[in-house]
Each structure stands twice: as structure tokens, then as C-alpha cells.
Amino acid sequence: MSSAPNGLHPYPIVQAPMAGGVSGPPLVAAVCEAGGLGFLAGGYKTADGMYQEIKQTRGLTRRPFGVNLLLPQTGYVDPAAVEAYRGQLAGEASWYEVSLAEEDIIGTSDDGYDAKLAILLEDPVRVVSFTFGCPDPAALARLRAVGTYTVVTVTSADEARAAQAAGADAVCVQGVEAGGHQGTHRDDPQTDGTAGVGLLALVTQVREAVALPIIAAGGVMRGAQIAALLAAGAESAQLGTAFLACRESGAHPLHKKALTDPMFPHTELTRAFSGRPARGLVNRFMREHGPYAPAAYPQVHHMTSGLRTAAAAAGDPQGMALWAGQGHRLARALPAGELVEVLAAELADAQSALKVLQMRRAS
């Protein structure tokens, strides 16, 4: 097993695991075949559903790929706050003619973690990454024993130290620019609006805090940005929003279109759709309900699921969770394999230009 994540694939380009059907087998296989590292999202599906996607991906590519797992959420959730938010969303439910999921049918907050981990131990993939926390050392050791490279998503130097202490092989350093959920190990509503560090600064902090290889994630859309991150100490860069617009992406067509639509000029972090901070394009739902959303993940995620589905079916992007990073306006609707090749070429050009500049300065 390689000592660095980019040893698993020719290019230092990683396709982010995007739950909700975005990063399925077609996207993952296309990225891997082009020389990047593709990731299946294990979240928001059953253990068997995850296993079926692994089998499908193996049928599309022989190259290494990864699977991402969401850590169980054990923090206290205030039932009264959840019910108050249900009342806040009553008008949405009436408008879209759907019911809001009740607490007793939401299910547990572990996302089937143990069953998914058991499958990955019995039938290993080359890489497994984790989000929303750090697995216990025993789980990481068991994965290493079956030949799996482990990556823990971190948003601070302290979280990176915890991942190193637990025995992770690498960290995915997620800057505040990243689209979708912030992968913080602890969801603290007291830090809303103040937490989060930009990716370049965070990579430097983590590089000086731990000896683990770094995958840098957050707002990366161009090869020149990858070059900058490699220069800062990362081994590879992880891109999500950049692949969201690809034809192999499972994102809704309205979501893909919104990335470059002037109607959605910027992003914000919000709890409106899931109860956990996540970055998305600012729309009506986010503006109207974000200020009232409680820290209640995954309860709010399940509560709003029907609303989001109904909004998509109605062709209404104003009611959808349009997850996107800060670089969304730079999205390119290319086939995934072509996008990997373009990014690799841009990276090579940027690195060559830097070498020329260094030579000039040295002469």
C-alpha cells in the first residue's frame, strides 16, 4: 500500500464523495479510468445499497477507488427544537403537498455504519474515507489489516492530530470554501458564522501539525489551484463541485444548471436542509428557513427529504438543496474523464510556469 494517497492513481486528483446519488458508479469509474481517484458516497443508503454500487463500479473499472462512510452522530438533539422547526416548515409541506417525516420514522443516526464497515472489511476496497468524526483505532487497524488505505476528513489541526493518533493513513483537509457538509468532528452551533478556515491556510496549519499525507479539499476548480495546494504541502486535491456538472454526475439537471446561473451568484453555510452546517447556493428555502434551523443532524435531513424531492420534481430549484463550493461559477460541463485530463494539463502548465519563474529568479 502506498504511503501517500496520490500513489494510488496517476494524477493527484480526487473526486469527492457526494452523497445523495451524485457520485455513483458511472462518475467514479470515469474518474478512475482517466487517472484520478474516484469515491463512492456510502452515506444516505443502506449497507446493501452501498455494496451493490461497489459491485457496479468494479464492473466499470479495474482501477482503485474509494468509499466514504459517515460516522454515527451521538450528540444531543433537542426534540423541542426539532418540533419547532417542523412547524416552521408547515407551509412548505402544504405548498409541495408532502408530509414531513415524523421523529419516530426517522430512524437511528448511525447511517448503518457498523453494517457498512463490516462489508468493507469482508470485501475490501483500496481506500475508505470518513466524515463527521474519526473512527476508533481498532476500526482503522482492521481496515489496514485487509489492505485498505484510510483517510479521515478534518477541518482543523486538532482534528488532524486526533486522526493521526487514531492511526489514519492520511487526512482530507477540508477548507471552509467546500460545498456540501462541513466535515467537523463536533457540531458546535456556538461557532456558526465564525468557524472555518480557508483551505491554503488550513493545509499549512495541518502540514505543521501532523506527518500524515494531505488531500486538500474546498473550492478547487482549476489545475493551477491544485498546483498551489501541492506547493503548500498537500499530496493531492479533492474536487466535488467541479465534478458535479459532469454528465456522469447523478446531480439533478436543475442543480447542475444552477452552478453557473446568474440567479444563484453566491453560496453560504446553512443548517436549513440538514441541521448541520453545509455550503450551498443561496435560494429561497435557505433565506427563509436557515435562521430558524436547529442543530439537529440527521433529524432535519430526514425531515426535509420529502420537501427537497418534491421541489426537484416540480422543477423548483428554490426549494432544493443546491450544494456547491465557493468556486461554483467555474464549473465546466465536461465528461468526467475529459475534466480529469484538462485539470492534469492545467496542473502541468502551472508547475512548468513555476519552474521557469524559479529559474529566472535563481539566474
Image: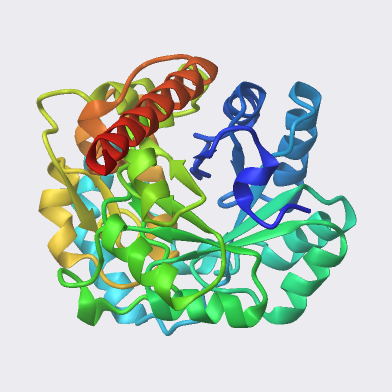
Q: Position of residue 184 (x, y in %)?
A: 40, 69
Of 104 and 362, nearer the camera is 362
Asked if residue 319 shows in the view, the reply is yes
The residue depicted at 20 percent of the width and 29 percent of the height is: 329
Q: Viewed as shown, does residue 171 lie left or right of 343?
A: right
As drawn, which residue projects farthest toward the front? Answer: 363
The residue depicted at 25 percent of the width and 59 percent of the height is: 198
Asked if residue 304 shows in the view, the reply is no
Q: What's the coloring here?
A: rainbow
Q: Is residue 73 above or below residue 170?
A: below
Of 46 and 117, nearer the camera is 117
Q: Is residue 300 above or below residue 98?
A: below
Q: Viewed as shown, does residue 225 lie left or right of 5?
A: left
The residue depicted at 36 percent of the width and 26 percent of the height is: 313
Of 164 and 24, nearer the camera is 164
Q: Position of residue 153 (x, y in %)?
A: 50, 63
